[in-house]
Amino acid sequence: MFIENHMTLNPQTVRPNTLVAEALGSLQHGRFHHLPVVDDAGRLVGIITDRDFRSAVGYDQHVRANLRVEEIMSTDVVTVRRDAPLEEAIRLFFEHRVGALPVVQGQQLVGIITKHDIMKAARDWLGLDRAGRRIEVAIPLGVSDIVHALSALSDDDEIYSLVAARLRTDGREPVLYIRTANSNAPIVERKLRQRGAILLAPEKPPPAL
């Protein structure tokens, strides 16, 4: 659950003196949304995004012949260390409203991590790559309730993920989310009820506007 396990190594980069037309071609060819800008020593000096391109050239995509990357890049780059936990990247994404974070080791660019990478990691944590069902268990007493609920489970149960949340979005009680195989869900629910666990109805999504 560290950045280096989910980042893209050796991402496509450009130099400050690269022509914007050339950089735009790289962006479109690779279907990227972000291009880190590095100097000749591989040190991160800026970043350009598809938004930067639109601001610089307009929607008619007419690029001034001698326009260079250093004229449109952002130099105040939000970065993350390769040995940082994924929670740090999530915090930075929310605080700075960026779509990607260059990954650095010292001043050297070693990778890039995007919001899409975080979503893929979350999919793996939560077992969403396999069909399953979520069971919600009230845990008003916190850790003791979690231990009690887990004591109902065995190695034979197909448990994809276990997540304890501080609060439900539709109420005040803390909850334990258990994701299991569809075929195993009734068995897990029965075991939990036999141990006295309080099973909750799944939260309803907000009404459409």
Image (cartoon, helix red, strand yellow):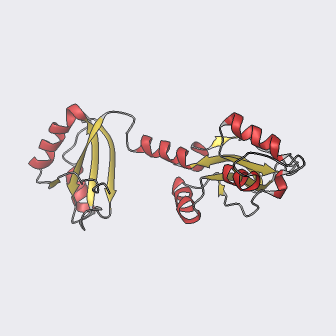
Along the line of sight, the residue nearer the viewer: 191 or 37: 37
Along the line of sight, the residue nearer the viewer: 23 or 61: 61
Q: Residue at x 53, y 53 (%)?
A: 86
Is 3 on the left or on the right of 106, as rendered? left
Is 176 on the left or on the right of 128, as rendered? left
Question: Within the image, what quadrant is residue 81 found in?
Answer: bottom right
Q: Is residue 64 above or below residue 131?
A: below
Along the line of sight, the residue nearer the viewer: 48 or 167: 48
Find the residue positioned furthest to the front.
Answer: 60
Is 15 on the left or on the right of 89, as rendered? right
Find the residue positioned furthest to the bottom.
Answer: 172
Tell me where residue 48 appears, x and y as whole percent: 73, 52
Q: Residue at x 74, y 60 (%)?
A: 74
Tell me where residue 170 appears, x and y as whole percent: 25, 62
Q: Is residue 19 above or below residue 44?
A: above
Question: Within the image, what quadrant is residue 14 found in?
Answer: top right
Question: Within the image, what quadrant is residue 166 found in?
Answer: bottom left
Tag count: 0
Tell me where residue 167 appears, x and y as whole percent: 30, 64
Q: Residue at x 64, y 41 (%)?
A: 8
Tell me where residue 195 appears, x and y as whole percent: 12, 50
Quadrant (top left/top right/bottom left/bottom right) for the C terminus: bottom left
